[in-house]
Image: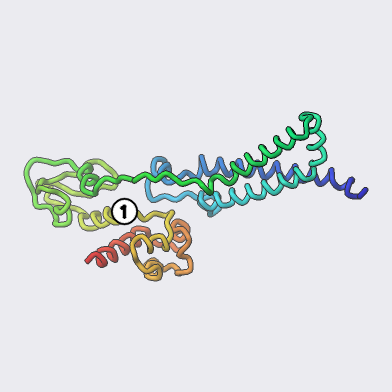
Amino acid sequence: MKNWNKIKPKLNLVIDFIMLIVMMAVSGLGFLMKYVLLPGYKINEVYGSNVELYFWGLDRHQWGTIHLYLAFFLIFLLVLHIIFHWDMIVSILQQMVQPKTKRLALLIIIGVLSLFLALVPFFIKPEIAQFKRKHNRNRISESFQPVSGTSHLPSEVGKMFDNDTAYIQRPVPGTLNLYSKAGTKVGNDAADIQHHHNNEAGINGSMTLNEISERFNINVDELAKAINVPADNANERLGRLKKRYGFSLDDLRLYVKTKSDGNDR
């Protein structure tokens, strides 16, 4: 018992130091996920599309998992801290709140409130809002400006418009290289149109092969084979797989579109 009385203050000090380090780590990871590893919609604003952000090879979701584990560890340290300081807590509480019934009521309130704040997320039902995306035709037509006269557009493009009006290219990055009849050239039309439709598949680096398989009703083994990735990695995010195996998301989008069009028929 005497040895414990000597060890206890030192152990308390070690626990306090560890708590401080873990608390700073939890705060730092929160700042990392908020201001550095931006969520998808902010990535598009800052870096453009088709970009994944990593730190030490981990994306924001994986750092979020580490953040959660550190939070569990911090709770464990806090419980130890309370246990080792229980005598001091009781003594101070007795001086602050004299009636025993009030002390008991205060402890119950603090305990219930703590459990409520920790467990209430498991009972929250999220609000669901529909994500509205503009139709392909509207997005393409905004990228081109009509000119006088008419021209015969390629069949792939013609299906997207109601009339046969010729279009010239605006200085908008990523748009199709269409020229008017006067220019006599329609450049890279088929490949660019295919690329545009592939992007509409909604496949990005934060998805997994299993998610794509469920969404488009395509066998996951076929998806893995199409990009030369082991099927065992079907639960890993495409951004990490792309970095490791060097495939192109556009190739995967094209494969998914081809399979989906075949299933529709």
* Residue under numbered circle 1: 199
- Amino acid residing under circle 1: Asn
Question: For residue 97, which quarter of the picture?
Answer: top right
Question: Left of 166 or right of it: where is 174?
Answer: right
- The answer to whether residue 245 is above or below residue 125 is below
Q: Secondary structure at mark 1?
A: helix
Residue at the image position 29 percent from the left and 44 percent from the top: 173
Q: Image point 17% across, 44% down: which residue?
A: 168
Q: 169 or 65: nearer the eye? A: 65
Here the colouring is rainbow
> Which residue sits furthest front?
101
Label 1: how many residues lie within 10 Å, few (<14), some (14-19) or many (20+)? some
- The residue positioned farthest toward the right in the image shown: 2
- Residue 32, percent from left and from top: 55, 43
**Front-lying residue, 99 or 255:** 99
Q: Give percent across and percent down for residue 113.
A: 62, 39
- Residue found at the very far left of the displayed protein: 149
Q: Is residue 101 above or below residue 67?
A: above
Describe residue 92's horizontal placement relative to residue 120 as left or right.
right
Query: How many numbered tags mark residues here?
Result: 1
Q: Position of residue 61 (x, y in %)?
A: 51, 51
Horizontal side of 230 relative to 166 (left or right) equals right
Foreground residue among 33 and 9 = 9
The residue under the point 29% across, 66% down is: 259
For the residue pair 218 and 59, the one nearer the viewer reads as 218
Residue under the point 46% across and 46% down? 125
**Quadrant where the image shows the C terminus:** bottom left
Compared across the picture, whether 110 is left or right of 129 comes to: right
